[in-house]
Image (cartoon, rainbow, N blue to C red):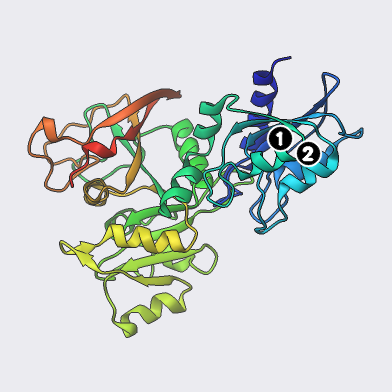
Amino acid sequence: MTDEYYMQLALGFARKGEGFVNPNPMVGAVIVKDNKIIGAGYHEKYGGPHAEPVAIASCFMPPDGAALYVTLEPCCHHGKTPPCVPAIIKSGIKKVIVGCLDPNPLVAGNGIDELRKSGAEVISGVLEEECVKLNEVFFHYIKTGLPYVVMKYAMTMDGKIAAHTGKSKWITGEAARHNVHQGRCRYTAVMAGVGTVIKDDPLLTCRIENGRNPVRIICDTTLRTPLFSQIVKTAGEVDTIIATACEDIEKQKPYIDAGCRVIAVSKKDGRIDLNKLMERLGKERIDSILLEGGGELNWSALNSGIVNKVQAYIAPKILGGKDAPSPVGGLGIDSPESAFCLTGSKIALFGEDILIESEVKPKCLPE
């Protein structure tokens, strides 16, 4: 078998930690001796053992002289757990094949250097593109300290997110909605505007088996989220943040009493300053956000430059109506040449619905 084959297996193990290791990276490891897999493991949850010691512990025979395939460079510093490099050296593993380097300044090539100094052979860059893509959230967060933001919306083929009456259930089918719930499990938080709460009264929870509820973030400039909304009523059960420019302690008190965390954020152009909010959330170890906002919040997010990826679910339906809402509102761009640019588009089918997923090109964003 080839190095690529075993690294592909390690990637499969790594994905099992999706949604449970944030803000740590997903990492998988496979140990091979005499052309036979003798151990494997992955980082299962934040604060738990890393993939390498899990794989070593799983070996059904001594790993001395074996080869270790790991999707991310082994760590060499103390964090929530001991460093992995000493454990690898102690195991007697003599060859380490690494998918990609760790951008964390505490590692950043040091793990590979220590392994080589111990006498181990190290090869890096095997399926590097796939390994980097797996942890796009981690790479962004560790480099910027800011959450990776995915703007998600569902629309008809004529670009409507609701009928002219405001009714929007349901634009897409069950398969597409199930994938959205997987996204809520994958990303640390989900964010919506107060207008969505007032209009739809959503729960914004993850409703799939063995899923994990995201932190719910409501952008509410003047603090008008209804106290009887499902968001507030379930704040004692699901971590809920209300980001507001309202500093009136008495007005905040009912929300705090209900279990919400209220974060005061300064205003910009009459709304919450989303850049300041991202800085605050990044410090709270929120590494990723699924943005499920309405047209106004989506426009503000794009215009402020916080959006990294766009997920557009397109249903084979036509609603029509000049007053029916579209996914992005606001003032809009003056001309096509100034449009927000997307790249790397990928297409997937969920039942009859189409998902187009694209990355936002930062250089096309307004200064």
**Residue drawn at point x = 11 percent, y = 47 percent:** 331
Q: In the rendered image, is residue 337 in sight?
A: yes
Q: Using the rendered view, name the quadrant where residue 3 is placed.
A: top right
Residue on which disc 1 sits:
29
Q: Using the rendered view, name the quadrant where residue 267 is placed.
A: bottom left
Whether label 1 touches label 2, CB < 8 Å = yes
**Residue drawn at point x = 79 percent, y = 46 percent:** 87
- Say whether disc 1 or disc 2 marks the residue closer to the N-terminus: 1
**Residue drawn at point x = 44 percent, y = 55 percent:** 203
Residue 110 % position (x, y)? 62, 45
**Above or below, comparing residue 139 to residue 266 in the picture:** above
Residue 27 % position (x, y)? 64, 39
Residue on which disc 2 sits:
55
Image quarter of the N terminus: top right
Q: Is residue 325 shown left or right of residue 109?
A: left
What element does badge 2 sit on? Answer: helix
Nearer the observer, 57 or 13? 57
Q: Using the rendered view, name the quadrant where residue 13 is placed.
A: top right
**Above or below, comparing residue 260 to residue 206 in the picture:** below
Q: In the rendered image, is residue 198 in sight?
A: no
**Residue drawn at point x = 77 percent, y = 35 percent:** 119
Q: Name the kind of residue labelled 2 in the image.
A: Ala
Q: Which mark is residue 11?
A: none
